[in-house]
Image (spheres, grey):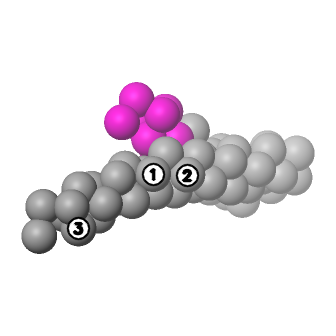
Amino acid sequence: MVWASIGVFIWLGGLYATIRGLLYEVPAEFRWGMLALAVGIATLVVALNPLAQREAGMRDRLD
């Protein structure tokens, strides 16, 4: 859950930088924002996926 939270904050920071880069026409900030957005989303998905698999395995064993 900690890694998922970190991924969300990276994603939000990337979203902020991307929008700010678009509004003020700063290409470097836009590029770094897009990179942070991708890293944040990937971190979130990777962090939450094992949790879902573990819970599914627990349900299968209980049935």
Q: Are marks 1 and 3 in contact (CB under 8 Å)?
A: no
Q: 7 or 15, which is in the foreground?
A: 7
Please, what is the dominant secondary structure of the magenta stretch?
A: helix
Label 3: how many residues lie within 10 Å, few (<14), some (14-19) or many (20+)?
few
Dot 3 amino acid type:
Asp
Image-based side of 62 in relation to 46, left or right: left
Q: CA distance from mark 3 to mark 2?
A: 22 Å
Instruction: State the quadrant of the N terminus.
Output: top left
Residue 23, located in which quarter of the rendered image? bottom right
Give the image location of residue 34, x and y in percent.
73, 55
Residue at the disc numbered 3: 60
Instruction: State the quadrant of the C terminus.
Output: bottom left
Give the image location of residue 56, x and y in percent.
29, 64
Give the image location of residue 5, x and y in percent.
41, 36
* Residue extending furthest toward the right: 28
* Residue extending furthest toward the left: 63
Dot 1 amino acid type:
Pro
Q: Are marks 2 and 1 in contact (CB under 8 Å)?
A: yes
Q: Which stretch did the figure color magenta?
A: 1-9
Asked whether residue 9 appears in the rendered view, the answer is no
Image-based side of 55 in relation to 38, left or right: left
Label 2: how many residues lie within 10 Å, few (<14), some (14-19) or many (20+)?
some
In front: label 3 or label 2: 3
Residue at the disc numbered 1: 50
Disc ID at residue 5? none
Residue at the disc numbered 2: 46
Image-based side of 16 in relation to 38, left or right: left
Q: CA distance from mark 1 to mark 3?
A: 15 Å
Q: CA distance from mark 2 to mark 1?
A: 7 Å
Residue 4 lies within the magenta run: yes
